[in-house]
Amino acid sequence: MIKKSPKTGIGPKIHPTAFIAKDVVIIGDVEIGAYTNVWFGVKIRASVCKIRIGNHTSIQENVVIHSEPGTQCNIGNYIIIGHLAMVHGPCEIKDYSMVGLSSTILQGAELGQGAVLAGGSVLRGQAKDYGLYAGAPAEFKKYYGEKRINSGKSSAIEYVDNGQNFKQRNFDQPIPKEFLIEE
């Protein structure tokens, strides 16, 4: 289901190359970039906020993304958000990062470029670039360095390719024309 916000009347803007699984719910002021995939069971609700998702990003099964009224949640390019994660903004997830399975990103949090939030972790503050963070609350565990950009990008591309395979085989829902980003 892809709908305008019942409160603001603002609808999503989705790039035509994005894969949006058949049962995904996207409501309100949401932008989804090129070749991003949004998998089964995902809920993205921006009825009173803004949510921006970049290019080549994978939002995996049963993720929930929402933000506080009047705020914005920014999810960059080449991001992987693992199954069952919760992203509750305002927050920012920078390029090439990974949010592990069943993790939570809370209001005001920032996951730095190339950073990894381990499965089951809860991020409440800032996770610096290229670091591994784990626990509840998440704490710094290891520094990866800029090499993490290449591994983050290649992992995201694998998921993007898989999403395109699903799209070609009609596992996606049609995106209403009024919600398509014009190329």
Image (tube, rainbow, N blue to C red):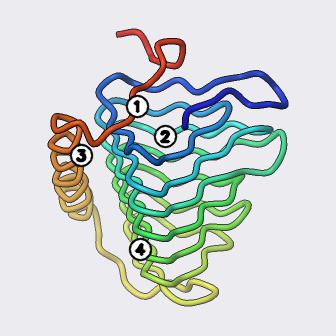
Camera-side mark, 1 or 3: 3
Q: Which residue is mark 4?
A: 100
Mark 1–mark 3 CB contact (< 8 Å): no
Determine the secondary structure under disc 4.
loop
**Mark 1 belongs to which amino acid?**
Gly
**Mark 2 belongs to which amino acid?**
Ile
Cα separation, mark 3 vs mark 4, equals 19 Å
Q: Earlier in the sequence, mark 1 or mark 3?
A: 1
**Mark 4 belongs to which amino acid?**
Gly
- Dot label at residue 163: 3
Report crowding for label 4: few under 14, some 14 to 19, many 20 or more residues within 10 A (C-alpha): many
Location of residue 15 (image quadrant): top left
**Mark 3 belongs to which amino acid?**
Gly
Q: Is residue 135 above or below residue 49?
A: below
Q: Earlier in the sequence, mark 3 or mark 4?
A: 4
Q: Is residue 81 above or below residue 165?
A: below
Report crowding for label 3: few under 14, some 14 to 19, many 20 or more residues within 10 A (C-alpha): many
- Dot label at residue 76: none
- Dot label at residue 53: 2
Q: Position of residue 146 (x, y in %)?
A: 27, 61
Q: Residue at x 39, y 59 (%)?
A: 60
Q: Position of residue 55 (x, y in %)?
A: 35, 36
Q: Would residue 26 be found to the left or right of residue 28 on screen?
A: left
Q: Earlier in the sequence, mark 2 or mark 1?
A: 1
Cα separation, mark 2 vs mark 1, equals 6 Å
Q: Which residue is mark 1?
A: 33
Q: Earlier in the sequence, mark 3 or mark 2?
A: 2
